[in-house]
Amino acid sequence: MWDYTDKVKDHFFNPRNVGIIENADGTGEVGSLACGDALTFTFKLDDNKEKIVDAQFKTFGCASAIASSSALTEMVVGKTLEEALQITNQDIAEFLGGLPDEKMHCSVMGREALEAAVDNFRTGKKGQKAVNEDIVCKCFGVTEEAIERVVRENDLKEADDVTHYIKAGGGCGECIPDIEKIIARVRGDMAAGGVAAPPKKKLTNLQRIALIQEIIDSKIRPALQRDGGDVELLDIDGTVVIVALRGACASCAISETTLRDVVQSRLRQEVDPDITVQQGEG
Amino acid sequence: MKEVYLDNNATTPIAPEVAEAMQPFFTTEYGNPSSMHTIGGRVKKYLDRAREQLAALINAEPDEITFTSCGTESNNWALRGSLLAQPGRRHIVTTKVEHPAVLEVAAYLGSRGARVTQLFVDGDGLLNLDELRAAITDETAIVSAMWANNETGVIFPIQEIAEICAEKGVSFHTDAVQAVGKIPIDVKKTPVSMLALSGHKLHTPKGIGAMFVRRRTPLKPFMLGGHQEHGRRAGTHNVPYIVGLGVAAELAAKYMDDENTRVKALRDKLENALIEQCPDARRNGHKVLRLPNTSNISFEFIEGEAILLLMDAVGIAASSGSACTSGSLEPSHVIRALGVPFTAVHGSTRFSLSRYNTEQEIDYVIEQVPPIIDRLRKMSPFVGGDVY
């Protein structure tokens, strides 16, 4: 069961402002049935068309989607459009006393609906989330721009975080490498604006051997031992690491794959991208 | 508050008879059944008795029963052990709707060099046996198909599948975690090679499972490090739970008729009433070929987690195939495999009964659920303003 705050539960069990305003000044529709959540958000402005005087929603989705929509309608009333557009998904989540990580996308949906509704008011175009050619996650129709924004605004570090906030990568997972690149780029830009990351220190030969041994012992062997296998470091010659597979790995039909996909890829990732792993006698 | 538990495919209430039978093995009867002395030997008799009780439920020989820690372990053992025992065969045939305890093991073995064929199901959740026949080759190490589906309750034609596999000389494993105790199973009549089952779906506490392994089935052990269970499954016996499982098996046989008459009638009453009273509700899975206790209903245009939480607020416990209840973003692979439209997948709700449910409880659910569905529909952007 999700650990929802009392405020989320309150807005789910007693949602405020459910409905669609007739003759609304702005209407925004985001999400879809296929995605598992969708929100129609409408607002009405005062006679001077300055401040929001009423906001209503209809939501298809889980408890946190309904609570986020309900919260949004309370948050925007009394605000000018400019002020309303300042509301971020973090503000919605904070208003609710926080949301579980996996549910942050519900707050993002609220912000997107609000933007779509304001856009609808200003341009008269159908208030839907802009459909852009630049879709990264095909399963959930998430654009590069949306991913960049959610990474920047929420200081996200991992592709998993992006999935929690905006769903991208949560379907087939094919776009996860692209998401990782976007995160690296955005965080690179962010760092460039502040302090640049220190360059990777060059290792001495001894340090390098110690690091390889440590990674094999602490990360690779436990993984292989879970399957009844094991690996032993025999020698290191420049970028060539020579190991012997033991236990179940030694007689395993796919030991080549283990060597390449487990041992080599880990060492490349953590020590040096030029490393090749070979199987030795011993 | 009134509590109505309709999530028995997730886990079941513990039978008082089971809890009582387990008690001595938490206190005075602490002996290790593998020991030579009297204190251990006394316990061994109860272990043997439990094995006989469980064997009787599925008409197996006692030495064909191995106790494990859970259904998941049994399933892991069947797939991994079958491949290990047959190095020349690297092919697994399974279905799209298996429990993750089979699907993820098959996928893992697939990532380690095995070839995996997943058979599709039709809109009722049934298999095409010609496709099964065509999928089996000389390379096939194991066919794994569940006896009954945990989400829809749909029952596969295990008799026919087992006969096809026997004819082709291929091991056949069935995940019968949901079927054992709910429908009659006779392994003398149905030539399955391996059958996995779990105690906590049969009113024992969680932490005990078993596997039927027919004699001469090629299978390497999964747990190593001891001679228990004739070397098939190392590890000191979980005596209290094994004793509990034996008693639970006996009770299941005793209540089998009740399950297939009274419980089934309650399930039908609930399902018919909800589909009749809630517009745009549909049953998922074959109407007849399914477990007597399970009903899976999709309420269109609304989402499962919201349904579950509102039901929970009035004391009704059920489960959902919606994405939001799982923490993943993908809704149930089983409901999607049936070709159920997206409009209905997210609102799929499973009610699973047991012999402890009463008609009064079902009447309460029939009274409480339709207003909940109506309330969420009024909030849904996919439902026209004044229709509901």
Image: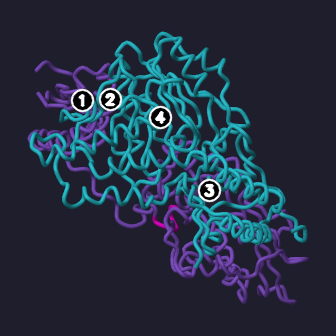
Chain colours: A purple, B cyan
Q: Which residue is mark 1?
A: B230
Q: Main secondary structure of the magenta part?
A: helix
| Dot 1: element | helix
Q: Quadrant of the N terminus of chain B?
A: bottom right
Q: CA distance from mark 4 to mark 2?
A: 13 Å
Q: Amino acid at mark 4?
A: Ile
Q: Which residue is mark 2?
A: B63
Q: Which residue is mark 3?
A: B320
- Is A153 colored magenta in this rendering? yes
Q: CA distance from mark 1 to mark 2?
A: 9 Å
Q: CA distance from mark 4 to mark 3?
A: 30 Å
Mark sitting earlier along the chain (4/1): 4
Please report the residue visible at 35 percent of the width from the left and 32 percent of the height from the top: B62
In the rendered structure, which segment of residues is drawn in magenta? A151-155
Q: Residue A253: give its label.
A: none
- Is A44 colored magenta in this rendering? no
Find out whether the residues at labels 1 and 2 contact each other: C-beta distance under 8 Å.
yes
**Residue A201 location (% of width, % of height):** 21, 50
| Dot 2: element | helix
